[in-house]
Amino acid sequence: MITNLKHLLKRRTGWILLLVAFIWIKTVIAYYWDFNMGAMDPMQHLLLIINPLASTLLLLSLTLYFKKPKATYLIAFVIYLLETILLYSNILYYREFNDFISFNTIVSVGKVSKGLGSSAIAMAQIHDVIYFVDLIILIILLGTKKIGFDSRPYSRLQAFTITSLALAGLSLNLFLAELSRPQLLLRTFDRTYIVKYLGLNSFLAYDGLKTAQSNSLRSTAQGTSMDPVLQFVHQHYAAANPQYAGVARGKNVIIIHLESFQQFLIDSKVKNQEVTPFLNSLYHDNNTLSFANFFHEVGQGKTSDAETMLETSLFGLPEGSFFTSLGTNNTFQAAPAILDQQQHYTSAVFHGNIGSFWSRDTVYKNMGYHYFFDQKYYQQTADSNTYWGSKDKLLFSESIKYLEQLQQPFYAKFLTVTNHNPYELSDVDTDGFEKPDTNNTMVNNYFATAHYLDEAVHEFFDYLKSSGLYNNSIVVLYGDHFGLNEGDESALAPLLNRDPNTWTEFDHLQLQRVPFMIHMPGLKGGIQKQYGGEIDSLPTLLHLLGVNTKPYIFMGSDLLSPQHDQNVIFRNRSFITPKYTVVNNNDKMTIYQNSNGEKLFQPDELLRQKLQKISHNKNHELELSDTINKTNLLRFYTPQGFTPVDPKKYNYQNQYQQLLKIRNNLGEHSTSLFSHNGNKSTTGLYKTDAPELQNNNAPIYEIPQQNNFSSKPRHKAQ
Ligand code: GP9
Ligand code: MN
């Protein structure tokens, strides 16, 4: 065996395999030591362990095609060095940004120096030596002639065999990855995911390909491409309703993103228990504008699509997620920046999942978010997380420490996660809620996690009241998208008192309603019957806050405006009007009547034409939105009174320290809740029955472990 090995090291194949082995071993060490890959099950661990192998072998096998042995040895060594540099740069970059280096980061010099310049040294750690030990071993092996230079010719067939082996390995890797995470490349959730399943090389290749594609599309656009967009926006503009315009001016805005929450949950009962008693009470509250006919309009980007619409009033893309594919480089004119520039709002997102998911850590900077509190700001114990991050009750209660430090008015968004499929939660968390007994576990569980989410929101509202924030805030609650998919609906139907045998595609589309509630003490509320969708939420909110939306490129319109467009288009181009539901199947329209769900087999010509026209207009709207996003058109247009966002101004590290520094600098001018409360924390006012926090009188607030590096506040003091 040993002699075989010694023998191998004296051949070209041996040289290649040795380099592959070194890269492989140190990459796996980095996965477990330096990166937080979040492998959850044996399959994910297996993928982590094997994924550097095939792509490295593939790259190095290419050097075997050189006739001259010197070339093989030398170029293979250069590839090995480049791989080492790539790995180590990623380690340093990850320590600062909790993310992997994208193709764009490499090509744009500014960002590289930002990520890997002088600061890189500060990111280095003693144990990093391990990533270079192999280099020393190599030198020793070469020096002691253990590695021999094989000058014999290398047959093409042999080289081809190795390349084929690498390609087969790569396919197997891809197959296993799809098995473990369906739609991995289609939805491109997160850089970490791609690295986790396919490795650093494949990630970079994939990212490079995507970037090249979008760059070539972008280069076709020019300033005049905005003309049809401006024309549409001008015609489509719906002026604010004078009854509501500016009624929430100056209030804090609190957005509560109800994960996977569908409207049918509101007022529903299971085994005589109200599923979401608190949200029901909000829905019926006189101070809540509750939109009964509000639809999600997401595509494959799910949560990220909902966020795109809510923050920009532009649609997500027809395929994939806008956040991950284009959002990291596009120009935005989004809610946080608009509110900051118009009314000096401080903005923050609170989310218990890792920051790189959906590329939020980059996209939020482009949107102008001042702060982003992601998973590392929340306690991480064995039972504090579900698959998607911090449990909602913990998310809300642990956020208070940060929320109370935000300068007011603030625009704060809470992204919940517990009500996300597979909707698994222990009985202790769901507080004895009895699940339904359908034969579909997903359906049964869904009601229990929705119940948990309801309690979490309730606790948060209690805090808003006890801390006084309630009186100067406007709270917006929305469901981002469906929680149960079409396949689950037959199990769900009986719970909605429906016969699954008569369930149609009409029912499926009608079920895409999600809550949209705007609550504020003193607001003239009530259940609103007008139709609308996620695309309409931003103009509605901005008008309530007294912002003139006319200069902005929004696809939606104010739900409260008499000129509001009530036709709602979905990403698959089916649409709903207040009277009809139209299913689009390869451009063939099937029309249903909303009043009774009946299919119109022979609609009269006039109606057909009318619906055709709506279809045409709404498709035009989707196409315009896609052109804006795909060709990054907003870079050619700056709304009056708006300054383009500079993402470099934002730094999501050491945010707690940044907030304290701003508070100290402002002294008595600080407007944070903490300052208004006589420089006393309000965290003690938070009451939660979260079992994870029961053994302590007060919640444990772990100050996130962070590097002291670059703790300068980048956000200007207001
Ligand atoms: C993860 C969360 C879930 O951070 O937002 O995203 P989804 O799978 O619903 O799109
Ligand atoms: Mn979601």
Image (tube, rainbow, N blue to C red):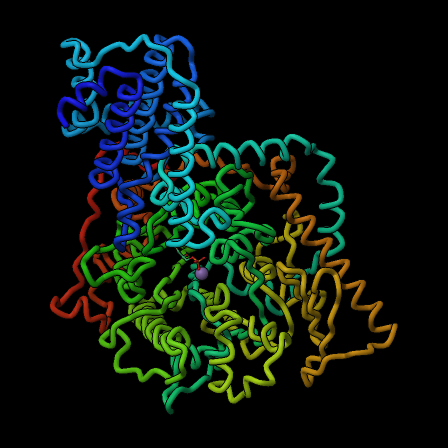
Residue furthest to the right in view is 605
Q: Locate residue 305 relative to residue 571 in the image: left or right.
A: left
Residue at the image point whose x is 42% and y is 35% from the top: 167
Q: Locate residue 16 relative to residue 276 in the image: left or right.
A: left
- Residue 381 at x, y percent in the picture: 18, 58
Residue at the image point whose x is 39% and y is 66% from the top: 421
Front one among 260 and 225: 260
State whether residue 653 appears in this view.
yes
Look at the picture and state if 322 lies above or below 581.
above
Q: Locate residue 58 relative to residue 678 in the image: left or right.
A: right
- Residue 489 at x, y percent in the picture: 51, 77
Residue at the image point whose x is 20% and y is 18% from the top: 7
Front one among 535 and 323: 323
Look at the picture and state if 278 lies above or below 544.
below
- Residue 146 at x, y percent in the picture: 16, 14
Residue at the image point whose x is 20% and y is 39% from the top: 33
- The image quarter containing residue 682 is bottom left
- Residue 640 at x, y percent in the picture: 63, 41
